[in-house]
Image (cartoon, grey):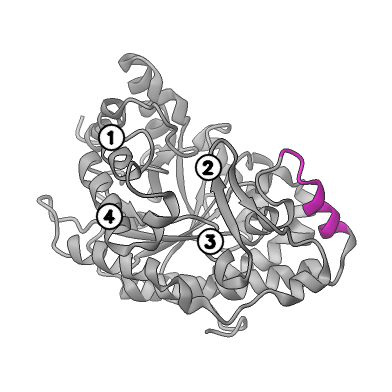
Amino acid sequence: MKDASVEPKSVATRENESTGVSRFVRACLRQPVDRTPVWLLRQAGRYMPEYMAVRKHHSLLEICKTPEIAAEVTITAAERLGVDAAIIFADLLLPFTPMGVDFEFLAGEGPVVHAPIRTLEQVQALRTDRVEDLKYVAHAIEKVARHFSAPRADGDQLGIIGFCGAPFTLASYMIEGGSSRNYIETKRMMYSDRAAWPLLMQKLVDVLVGYAAQQVEAGADVIQIFDSWVGALSVTDYREYCLEPTRELVRRVQALGVPVIYFGVDTASLLPAMRETGADVIGLDWRIPLDQGWKALGYSCAVQGNLDPITLFAPEDVLEARVREVLDAAAGRPGHIFNLGHGIVPGTPVENVIQTVKWVKEYEAR
């Protein structure tokens, strides 16, 4: 595992090490592309009949932990939608198990951690030496990368995205015991326990770097870091308690030679601080116009987003107008990856998702 002091490879170095084929990777590095690349958060999910057919026979964790099935789900979604990148089918909480944190998914409740981590002694007991137990994700990535090894009909190489959670978001699940509205226990530790919080952050970073390294070695072109619930923090709290561990995670993943996408929800006020992580791409949710979000970032990185996923339920004329609004806001500036502002929700019409991808692809051709 790389030491935290390792400096990230420069953007120029990472550009030279990339294949130079994938428009998705080039956009991550703010290089010119022939058209805006597109992929969608939760593009393999419960809105898609093919995925639901798999879920009839396998639980979520069974899919994640069986490389053949995880790869199949990943590949099917990417090919059905015609997107420019495939994100591996996995779950944010998978690193919990090798760290010694038991969890399960309960119907109607989501993830539940049976023994929440709330004391220094519990944090000290967390394991960081069993990252190899997560190799099943890397094996799935190998299968996906092998499947998409040849350039597509348009000559472009489909990008492969690996991912992990961010320290704050994973800590919130560990401490709260699941999802939360107010993050009371998380903030209690953050504010009050000057020993437990930084130790928890460091342990998470160390595990996540090892996990990301496996994914990159297996063929991931980009790593996305999901900080799904970081919008619960004020700018002051983000800077004081979360910025440095997140920056360390970004730096150490970049040192593996791949671009990093950093994404959170409800983060408009946090964007300048999030930029300080050094991530190559910042994901924007739908609550801020894309051009305003990019401006808040100083146009110093690429951006990903940011169609409201519920717009996918709208009539065709409304949906097309919203897609064009996002693309117009990017104004042709290098470094825009079209995506949603959050994941596709169950019940979304598949035909609307496919049509959205087509509109993005056709946009520059008009």
User: Of discs 3 and 1, which sits in the foreground?
Assistant: 1
Q: Return the residue at label 4.
A: 23
Q: CA distance from mark 3 to mark 4?
A: 18 Å
Q: Earlier in the sequence, mark 1 or mark 2?
A: 1
Q: Residue at x 39, y 66 (%)?
A: 137
Q: CA distance from mark 4 to mark 2?
A: 20 Å
Residue numbers of the magenta segment: 181-191
User: Of discs 1 and 4, which sits in the foreground?
Assistant: 1
Question: Which structural element holds mark 2?
Answer: loop
Q: Is residue 10 visible?
A: no
Q: Earlier in the sequence, mark 3 or mark 2?
A: 3
Q: Return the residue at label 2.
A: 284
Image coords of residue 68 (percent x, y): 27, 61
Pick whichever, 343 or 126, lies toward us: 126
Q: Earlier in the sequence, mark 3 or mark 1?
A: 1
Question: Which structural element holds mark 3?
Answer: loop
Q: Residues within 10 Å of mark 1 (few under 14, many from 20)?
A: few
Q: Residue at x 31, y 60 (%)?
A: 160
Q: In the drawing, what numbered circle is on residue 279?
A: 3
